[in-house]
């Protein structure tokens, strides 16, 4: 059995005290995941003593894998000094300086405790700066749990709309008015995007964009759309809000620099916390002034009991310092190798599957046709079931991916690890294809 009895018992116990026996939806897979006990580098040891090679890295947040020595040492150095204060600490300034030094377009930073909050504050700031109520986002894109950015996260074919994507509410009970203030754009369809933005620009405060959004298919934004988005923002005074909670890792200077965007605000998270809870809004000082609380009530008030807590700040700084230009280049190269190896082997074995992604991010699709956006990546019921089987087949081979078969590489991985991962992935796809073709 791939998941052992101790994890099973722990899950049974957990079922009583939390809905579904799991504290977070995303890591769950049936019948239940193994319970992690410890991690070191690329490896996690579970409650039954089994080891898995971790390509999930806590949903792309651990760019150096588990228990990265510089992060652990930095944490040890501050742990005895207390964990949180109702006062600022120097650690928050140091991490903010590290971010602004890497990305000169980001002149100022406000930290939050999660990526969800970072995106939420970026959206609120954009609305306040422009005095407009509406935001645009791409169909299928995940940006955290704020009502507005959840719109059309999982819209199904019967909801897709004829000429342009419908604004579909996500959580039951979301006020219907939410949908009226969210324009949903079709990814990598520049003509429709331009037309939709033109039509709504007077009410449109911001375009929210993740240039390598996982649930949009994890395909980098194409050059045509990039130009249309930047041009529309310049033309209509619409703010460009880039969600780099995941995609920050693609380049040393951040995703906005890799893609050549002029961002008005950027939401950060994941790797900038070195494995501890974090988020951040960053941008030019002129925009960030919206949060300035020194002259009475700010236009957008931002706080958070654990925002900029010194442990996250300290771990984040150690992680970023080790994510050097060389480390970024090496990891990106390994990602390229993984994708090209896997794609080539899948093609040679005539398996209808492909691997998308960019830099150290990857995602498996059980599709032969080219995946360009949410709709072309949308799995049929059969493909969805097969993806769950591939995930399990990978676990049997000792590799952990996210339950929907995406993943992120980490710096402790070696070239050999990447070859093994590619081979295991192709093998797993082949096994499932033979048993139950999609
Ligand atoms: N934006 C993106 C692109 C994300 O992938 C996520 C989380 N996976 C978030 C925002 C929200 O971050 P968090 O889970 O830290 O709230």
Image (cartoon, rainbow, N blue to C red):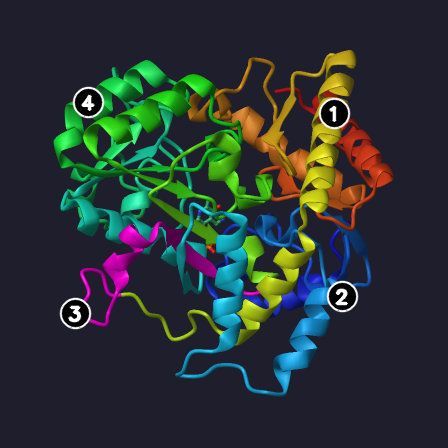
Q: CA distance from mark 4 to mark 2?
A: 51 Å
Using the rendered view, name the quadrant where residue 114 is placed. Answer: bottom left
Q: Earlier in the sequence, mark 4 or mark 3?
A: 4
Q: CA distance from mark 1 to mark 2?
A: 31 Å
Frontmost of labels 1 and 2 is: 2
Instruction: Pick whichever, 215 or 50, lies toward us.
Output: 215
Q: Residue at x 27, y 26 (%)?
A: 232
Q: Secondary structure at mark 3?
A: loop
Number of the label disc, if any, that sits on residue 297: 3
Q: Is mark 1 within 8 Å of ligand 1?
A: no
Q: CA distance from mark 4 to mark 3?
A: 34 Å
Mark 3 Cα-neighbour bin, 10 Å: few <14, some 14–19, many ≥20: few
Magenta-tinted stretch: 276-301
Dot 1 corresponds to which residue?
342
Residue 10 image point, x, y percent: 65, 68
Q: Is residue 404 left or right of residue 328?
A: left
Residue 105 image point, x, y percent: 42, 45
Mark 2 Cα-neighbour bin, 10 Å: few <14, some 14–19, many ≥20: some
Number of the label disc, if any, that sits on residue 198: 4
Using the rendered image of the protein, determine whether residue 46 is visible from the camera's viewpoint: no
């Amino acid at each position: 059995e791939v998941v052992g009895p101790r994890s099973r018992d722990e899950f049974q116990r957990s079922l009583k005290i939390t809905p579904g026996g799991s504290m977070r939806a995303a890591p769950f897979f049936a019948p239940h995941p193994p319970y992690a006990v410890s991690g070191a580098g690329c490896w996690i040891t579970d409650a039954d003593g089994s080891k898995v090679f971790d390509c999930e890295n806590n949903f792309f947040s651990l760019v150096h894998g588990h228990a990265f020595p510089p992060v652990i040492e930095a944490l040890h150095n501050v742990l005895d000094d207390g964990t949180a204060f109702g006062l600022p600490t120097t650690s928050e300034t140091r991490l903010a300086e590290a971010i602004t030094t890497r990305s000169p377009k980001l002149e100022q930073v406000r930290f939050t405790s999660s990526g969800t909050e970072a995106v939420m504050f970026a959206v609120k700031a954009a609305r306040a700066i422009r005095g407009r109520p509406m935001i645009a986002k791409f169909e299928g894109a995940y940006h955290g749990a704020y009502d507005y950015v959840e719109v059309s996260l999982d819209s199904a074919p019967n909801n897709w709309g004829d000429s342009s994507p419908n604004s579909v509410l996500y959580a039951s009970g979301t006020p219907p008015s939410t949908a009226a203030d969210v324009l949903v754009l079709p990814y990598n369809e520049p003509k429709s995007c331009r037309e939709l933005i033109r039509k709504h620009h007077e009410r449109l405060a911001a375009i929210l964009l993740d240039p390598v959004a996982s649930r949009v298919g994890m395909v980098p934004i194409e050059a045509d759309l990039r130009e249309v988005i930047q041009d529309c923002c310049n033309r209509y005074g619409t703010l460009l809000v880039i969600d780099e909670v995941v995609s920050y890792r693609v380049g040393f200077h951040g995703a906005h620099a890799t893609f050549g965007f002029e961002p008005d605000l950027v939401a950060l998270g994941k790797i900038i916390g070195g494995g501890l809870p974090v988020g951040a809004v960053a941008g030019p000082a002129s925009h960030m002034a919206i949060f300035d609380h020194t002259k009475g009530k700010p236009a957008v008030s931002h706080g958070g009991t654990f925002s900029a807590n010194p442990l996250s700040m300290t771990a984040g700084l150690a992680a970023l310092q080790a994510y050097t230009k060389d480390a970024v280049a090496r990891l990106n190269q390994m990602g390229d190798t993984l994708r090209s190896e896997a794609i080539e082997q899948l093609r040679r074995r005539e398996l209808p599957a492909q691997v998308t992604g960019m830099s150290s991010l990857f995602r498996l699709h059980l599709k032969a046709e080219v995946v360009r956006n949410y709709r072309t990546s949308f799995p049929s019921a059969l493909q969805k079931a097969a993806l769950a089987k591939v995930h399990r087949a990978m676990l049997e081979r000792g590799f952990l991916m996210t339950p929907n078969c995406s993943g992120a590489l980490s710096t402790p991985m070696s070239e050999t690890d990447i070859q093994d991962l590619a081979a295991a992935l192709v093998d797993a796809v082949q096994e499932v294809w033979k048993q139950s073709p999609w």
